[in-house]
Image: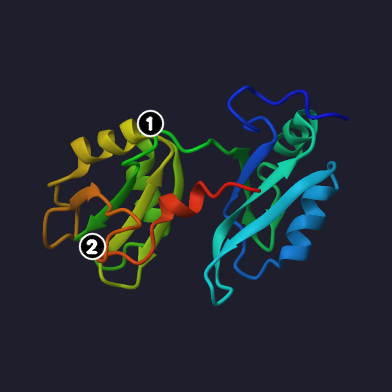
């Protein structure tokens, strides 16, 4: 098959993002799962320098038809007790800047599931990370407008069991000294 199904704005019809990957999934197993659908240009789990997986990765197929088949076949597929989400990866653009939120003053005991449930009514969450047990999280939306909707609706409200009103704001970018990890940078890594 050829890659003639690609759109004019790059390889958006062949490039997929896979979320909710188990931390223990190897790069070889990741590639094996997705190459079972069709020929790959690349497959990569996004990791820290020390090898820790961020829980998502990218797969770029040669053919748009294979990419669509991977979405249809593997979205919701269970790997090590986690159901993966397989979707088209979208290139970075102006409508994506400012889509990573920093959330503070979460009630103690709030986990990733709680944060996703709280923030999911406002848009498509690409990534959600709880930072230790400090009541802090990062929530990355697909689009800036979705992030803004969450800010408009959640900033300043006090949750049940919360001691302080939530602080919901756009996270500092990768150039900021205050945050060492910028999930927005990780999401839009381009393949060479």
Secondary structure of the residue carrying tag 1 is loop
Q: Residue at x 65, y 61 (%)?
A: 81
The answer to whether 44 appears left or right of 56 in the picture is right
Rendered image quadrant of residue 110: bottom left
- The extreme bottom residue here reads 50
- Residue 134 x %, y %: 26, 71
Q: 46 and 111: which one is in front?
A: 46
Could you say which disc has been placed on residue 95 in the image?
1
In this view, the mark in front (1 or 2): 1
Q: Residues within 10 Å of mark 2 (few under 14, many from 20)?
A: many
Secondary structure of the residue carrying tag 2 is loop
Q: Quadrant of the N terminus?
A: top right
Q: 78 and 42: which one is in front?
A: 42
The answer to whether 101 appears left or right of 52 in the picture is left
- Residue 46 x %, y %: 58, 60
> Mark 1 or mark 2, which has the lower sequence index?
1
- Whole-angstrom CA distance, mark 1 to mark 2, is 31 Å
Depicted 166 relative to depicted 91: above or below: below
The answer to whether 147 appears left or right of 126 in the picture is left
Could you say which disc has been placed on residue 107 in the image?
2
Q: Residue at x 39, y 36 (%)?
A: 96
Q: Residue at x 58, y 46 (%)?
A: 190
Q: Residues within 10 Å of mark 1 (few under 14, many from 20)?
A: few
Depicted 178 relative to depicted 98: above or below: below
């Amino acid at each position: 098959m050829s890659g003639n199904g690609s759109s004019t704005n790059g390889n958006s019809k062949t490039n997929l993002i896979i979320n909710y990957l188990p931390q223990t999934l190897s790069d070889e197993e990741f590639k094996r799962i997705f190459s079972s659908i069709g020929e790959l240009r690349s497959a990569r789990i996004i990791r820290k320098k020390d090898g820790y997986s961020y829980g998502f990765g990218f797969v770029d197929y040669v053919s748009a038809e294979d990419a669509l088949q991977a979405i249809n076949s593997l979205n919701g597929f269970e790997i090590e007790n986690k159901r993966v989400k397989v979707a088209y990866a979208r290139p970075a653009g102006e409508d994506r800047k400012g889509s990573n939120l920093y959330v503070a003053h979460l009630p103690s005991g709030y986990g990733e599931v709680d944060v996703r449930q709280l923030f999911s009514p406002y848009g498509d969450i690409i990534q959600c990370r709880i930072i230790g047990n400090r009541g802090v999280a990062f929530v990355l939306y697909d689009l800036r407008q979705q992030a803004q909707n969450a800010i408009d609706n959640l900033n300043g409200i006090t949750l049940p069991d919360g001691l302080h009103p939530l602080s919901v704001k756009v996270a500092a970018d990768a150039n900021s000294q205050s945050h060492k990890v910028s999930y927005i940078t990780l999401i839009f890594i381009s393949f060479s």
